[in-house]
Image: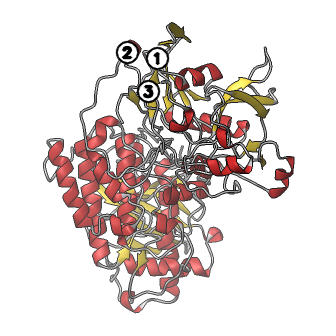
Amino acid sequence: MNDHSEQLPHIPGYDITRRLGRGGMADVFLGIQSSLSRPVAIKVLAVERTQGEDTVTRFEQEALTIARLDHPNIVSIFDVGRTGDGRLYYVMPYLPNGDLSTRDLRDDEAQVVAIIRSLARALGYAHKLGIIHRDVKPENVLFDKLDRPLLADFGIALAAEGFARVTREGSTIGSSGYMSPEQSRGFAIDGRADLYSLGVVAYEMLSGELPYKGPDTLAVALAHVEQPIPRLPPRRRRWQAFIDKAMAKSPDERFQTASQMESALDAVAGQIGGKPEAAYDTKPLPSLAAPSPASGWRAHSGLLLTVALIIAGAAMIAYAVRRLQHPPPALVAAGNVDPAAKAADAARTPASAAPASAAAPGAAATPDASASHGETSTAPAAAPPVGGPASDAAPAPAPVPPRPHLADLAAGAPLRDRAGPELVFVPGKFARDGKTVDIGNGFALARYEVTRRDYAAFVAATGRDASKCREPHSPLSLLRKLSWREPGFSQDDSHPVVCVSWADADAYVKWLAARTHARYRLPTHAEWAHAALWGRSGSGNCARGNLLDDKRALLAKDTDKGCSDGFEYTAAVGKFKPNRLGIHDLVGNVSEWTSDCKGAGKNSGAGCKEHMFSGNSWRDEATRAPDYQDDAGSDVGYTTIGLRVLRELDDDNIPVPGK
């Protein structure tokens, strides 16, 4: 809505028609440049809302930096100066087609290729000049009237040479949803950090969501550092190698230059039948009286982009303050401001904070993206998937198989949700000891127990505190301050997590369900035992899992109850042979929490104080029944109990088979 309560500023040479929005440091107005009769966006500094000297210094440095940029895919500025009442302003193009965050391109791979190619070229140009953008994200990709993408907001760009460093070593600047691991940690960065961010942008365009999410900026930043690269939807598998390369955790494993990234795009374009140079469809320039509203997968309101314009504009306005007070030698001569120069606000609000007001489309710069989106998920080529050991190579692109019916699934069929663990189909019926066992509907059980790596992802995303932990039958162990990170014996990330309470396990499966948009929960004991006893042979338990080792049995003078398995405590998941369904560690390693509450008639909700766990652990005798169950307090973890997840299935809710 136009604000007619305030007088519009007077700027010679511009006919200002209305205010587009207001931000923390500047107001944005829509105007017509009289000499050329073209629409422009004008940001006018609100003097009472200006920042301190450090911000002015940074903006001055920014202006000198972006004055060096002249590229068809980088937003330019037209003019800087003062209004009739002395307020500073700067002018940039009125960009009517919004930003990339308002577009849903999941079904337009050719357009994704074209946009990433244009941005890679813009970054490659900046990198050759020693300039690192540091904030590549959809909100900073704007579209002109011909619908061409332009990279905006060099407000926090870092010049490698020639200018004083304003940000301190170890500080973190950028939007956490798109930051490279080294940038998140405050380490020194180079152009490969921008290419990582561009890889995140590509992932988001292809999937419709960020790769990592969390409740705050810190959780998202940690996810970029610690969590594996997620898998794209099956229909976008041809992009996975590109994403894995662009988003590699180590800069040395990424594309080393923007031209390398562009060459990889050519290979993807060839697979989708695209051309090396994908063309853009043009769109008409909307009426100035009624700019078209934003629409798409993250559109919020008709004013979203103008707040962005407000924030970014403070950069050039603050620069103009400094320039008018202390003109830099390179810009002393009148009219010597490079038309290609562009500015943005470096003193941005925290990524987790919401904008102060909405903004209009057509603004030439944009607000920060929220850092609370992003999502941890399954493993890349060099990192283990959720619920499984590490893989040595990325999966090759493959045709997407048709979605089956439940009756079509064979026992042991591999299943997997995007961003979920490896699963195995367990039919509801099977024959055992000459009888047919039927527990109802089939389900999918995780192939592996939840590992420390998996649980660390959950903790990083949710900030959940560690529960109290104890050794079984040792009340004094509570005094040792054991936890899932420090269980009192050596473990690595591939070992099953222990020292998690039932409440922790329940929170984990709810988090996994939200992350995958699928029905995950803890199994009942009946379901767990059904899978554990499937096709069980007559061989002894020692041959099938990590149980009480001879060394510990000797200490207990129970040598006949031990196994020579070589593991005094836990083993890495999948170390022992799977059962006939292909599920590992249902015998030994750790006992596993179930959804069952102790006592008949009690539910497993918050009112249940003691829950059941199933199976034997690394310290249990080989002679104990494999479907053993017992109970424990729901709010305490144990060094012998972990968890495994179950996914509910029906004909309309089956993940596409595949490893």
Residue 94 or residue 655, whichever sits in front: 655
**Side of 477 where 325 appears, left or right:** left
Is tag 1's residue or tag 3's residue first in the polypeptide sequence? 1
Residue 13 is left or right of residue 445, and the answer is left
**Residue position marked by numbered label 3 in the rendering:** 581
Q: Quadrant of residue 513?
A: top right
Closer mark to the observer between disc 3 and disc 2? 3
Residue 629 left/right relative to 415:
right
The quarter of the rendered structure image containing the C terminus is top left
Q: Position of residue 243 (x, y in %)?
A: 33, 52
Q: Amino acid at mark 3?
A: Leu
The residue positioned 41% from the left and 58% from the top of the image is 140
Residue that badge 2 annotates: 405
Query: What's under tag 2, amino acid-wise?
Result: His
Position of residue 367 relative to residue 131, above or below, is: above
Q: Position of residue 126 (x, y in %)?
A: 31, 72
Which colour scheme appears in the figure? Answer: secondary structure
Give residue 346's mark.
none
From the top left corner, tell me how far across and down residue 269 is, in percent. Answer: 18, 48
Dot 3 falls on a residue whose secondary structure is: loop
Along the line of sight, the residue nearer the viewer: 218 or 331: 218
**Label 1 environment density (alpha carbons within 10 Å; few <14, some 14–19, many ≥20):** many
Question: Can residue 283 be seen in this snapshot?
Answer: no
Look at mark 1 in the image and give the residue it sits on: 427
Question: Where 258 falls versus 295 (above or below)?
Answer: below
* Residue depth check, mark 1 versus mark 2: number of the one nearer the observer: 1
Inspect the image, locate mark 1, and give the three-letter code of the amino acid beneath it.
Pro
For marks 1 and 2 on the same chain, the one whose residue lies earlier in the sequence: 2
